[in-house]
Image: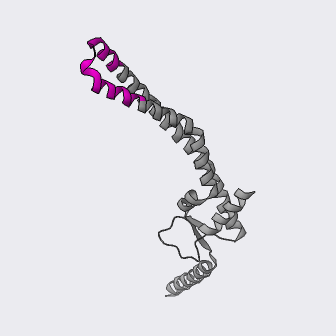
Amino acid sequence: MKSSVLILTILALFSAVNVAVAEELRIGVVDVTKLLEESPQAEELRKRLDSEFQRRSKDLLAKQKQLKNLSDKLSRDGAVMSDAEVKRLELDVRTRRRQLKSASDEFREDLNLRRNEESQKLRRQLTEVIHQLGKDENIDLILDNAVYASARVNLTDKVLQRLNAQFRK
């Protein structure tokens, strides 16, 4: 009987401590996806990548157009061309198609690598801002992308404001 009372007393004390700790716990939520889409740093990243890969993109489009023109010429004029000319043009189309596919694959791979590199830098910057906000406002736990978060615990706009301030500096 005495051990049951002792156990109940200990459980009651632990419950009281847990309630006290839970009341002091400050939790926040940040929508990182929104920050990656709306922050000025993300917009700058997109512009920088567009300008970096713009020339190669235009070159690929020009090569696609040339290939289409050659294919159209082969389809349109193939009946009136000599067999040697048709074979030469078919070979040229196949060669250009392979080169275009290779160049497109290389372009896509390079773009993805650069985008991933820059995205990692941006994510590190977001993490630093979120950590600093947590320290500044004495928040015990900050979660990423909750299913539901009330406006009281949603810190996304505060982080976005800090990112805007950093960007202006």
| Residue depicted at x 60% and y 48% | 47
The colouring scheme, among rainbow, by chain, secondary structure or one colour, is one colour
Residue projecting furthest to the right = 169
Using the rendered view, name the quadrant where residue 17 is placed: bottom right
| Up-down relation of residue 83 to residue 76 (above or below) | above
Q: Is residue 4 magenta?
A: no
- Where residue 44 appears, as percent x and y from the top left, is 63, 51
- Where residue 24 appears, as percent x and y from the top left, is 64, 78
- Residue 145 lies left or right of residue 88; in this view the side is right
| Residue depicted at x 25% and y 18% | 80
Residue in front for this viewpoint, 17 or 134: 134
Magenta-colored span: 66-91
Using the rendered view, name the quadrant where residue 83 is placed: top left
| Up-down relation of residue 154 to residue 113 (above or below) | below
- Residue 93 lies left or right of residue 112; in this view the side is left
- Residue 159 lies left or right of residue 169; in this view the side is left
The reply to whether residue 117 is in sight is: no
Residue in front for this viewpoint, 159 or 142: 159
| Residue depicted at x 34% and y 15% | 88
| Up-down relation of residue 163 to residue 139 (above or below) | above
Residue projecting furthest to the left = 79
Residue in front for this viewpoint, 112 or 133: 112
Image quadrant containing the C terminus: bottom right
The reply to whether residue 97 is in sight is: yes
- Where residue 43 appears, as percent x and y from the top left, is 60, 53
Give the dominant element type of the magenta stretch: helix, strand or loop: helix
Q: Is residue 86 magenta?
A: yes
| Residue depicted at x 27% and y 13% | 82
- Where residue 138 appears, as percent x and y from the top left, is 69, 71
